[in-house]
Image (spheres, rainbow, N blue to C red):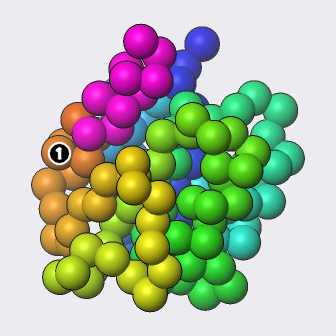
Amino acid sequence: MARRILVVDDEPVLRMLISRAFRERGYEVVEAADGLAGLDVARSASVPFDLVVTNSHMPHMDGAHLAERLRELDPRLPIIHLSGSHSGRGSRTMPADVPTILKPFDIWDLVAEAETLIAQREA
């Protein structure tokens, strides 16, 4: 069974590029356009996600709030935070174990980080 990744980003082009890279590596990818939609997808999923990639600033629910809510569903869920902020953080604080990748980034660095986090969870 393919590993499942949820990509949550309000920028359609970036969301598509991230999703395409993971699909090329054999992952099943589900996309959501904002944090609230991402939370709804995660709650209704019949099979849990192996990892979530989320943007910082999005309509309806920011990435930090989404991460908090996702961790209520699965405390060990690997999450990667994407940020355009040079401080690497939005207005809310991400959980300490959530790595931040600053935009612009190399898509294959993101995939490598995701694979590392998934492997750590499975170990």
Is 70 in front, or is 84?
70
Residue at x 37%, y 23% (from the top left corner): 120
Residue pushed farthest front? Answer: 96
Q: Is residue 121 visible?
A: yes
Is 74 in front, or is 104?
74
Q: Is residue 16 visible?
A: no
Is 120 in front, or is 45?
120
Q: Position of residue 20 (x, y in %)?
A: 38, 46
Splitting the image into 4 quarters, where does residue 13 fall?
Answer: bottom left
Across the whole image, how many numbered discs are drawn on residues?
Answer: 1
Q: Mark 1: which secondary structure? A: helix
**Is the residue marked by circle 1 packed among few (<14), some (14-19), or many (20+) residues within 10 Å?**
few
Splitting the image into 4 quarters, where does residue 32 fall?
Answer: bottom right
Q: Position of residue 11 (x, y in %)?
A: 44, 77
Residue at x 47%, y 48% (from the top left corner): 79
Magenta span has 53?
A: no
Magenta span has 117?
A: yes
Q: Which residues are magenta?
A: 113-123
Residue, disc 1: 109
Question: Disc 1 residue type?
Answer: Asp
